[in-house]
Image: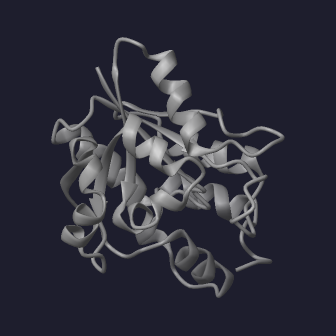
Amino acid sequence: MKIGIFGGSFNPPHKMHKKIAIELIKKHYVDKVIFVPTGSKYKYKNNLLSDNVRFKMLKLMCEDNNLEVSNYELKDQVVYTYETLDYFKNKYKDDEIYFICGTDNLSYLDKWERGEYILSNHKLLVIKRNTDDINTLLEKYKDYKNNIIVTEIDENEISSTKIREMIYNNKRVNDYLDDNIYSYIKENNLYREMI
């Protein structure tokens, strides 16, 4: 089995996250996708909702379609991506593990904690962002080209940041969120106090 590991803050998880995962499965890049939300101890993310709330929203989004959610990074200390990928590689010894990332993340992955280790030891499924030049990135990482697979999946530019701003400003966000996630956000009055 081919398993995609999709990390991120998912604050909130939106339709583009789900679309990417489903497209990767439909186009046979992977057989299932596991979403791995970043823990709130991660120092580069501000305004994260609690681990439990983001995990709950992901569970709502992943009720079908070979999508799963893991709480592996939701700990009292920072868990780095290389640790997460090693964990899943060890857990699913007979399967192939792929790290799903956008070209925006790939552009500075060598600066991540043990980034060169990730590039050397793990396979990457890369989603093209509109603004990034994939050929430049492939040249930058030519030593790792056997581990980098550029997917034929397009991503639009909607972001969780933009959605939070829209909720904060009482703008309509129904088009960007699954109905059950939108209802959960409304019922729990989320994103009303922060951008």
Give left or right: position of 145 versus 174: left
Residue 165, quarter of the rendered image: bottom right
Q: Relative to 87, does residue 178 appear above or below in the rendering?
A: below
Give left or right: position of 155 versus 87: left
- Colour scheme: one colour
Please tell me which residue is depicted at 54% across the width and 69% down the height of the picture: 160
Please tell me which residue is depicted at 46% across the width and 58% down the height of the picture: 109
Q: Relative to 32, does residue 92 appear above or below in the rendering?
A: above
Residue 172 or 49: which is nearer the viewer? 49
In the displayed image of the protein, which residue is found farthest to the bottom?
169
Give left or right: position of 161 versus 94: right
What percent of the width, then of the height, locates residue 11?
A: 62, 61
Q: Relative to 157, does residue 89 appear above or below in the rendering?
A: above
Residue 185, quarter of the rendered image: bottom right
Please tell me which residue is depicted at 57% across the width and 75% down the height of the picture: 161
In the displayed image of the protein, which residue is found farthest to the front?
143
Quadrant into which the N terminus falls: top left
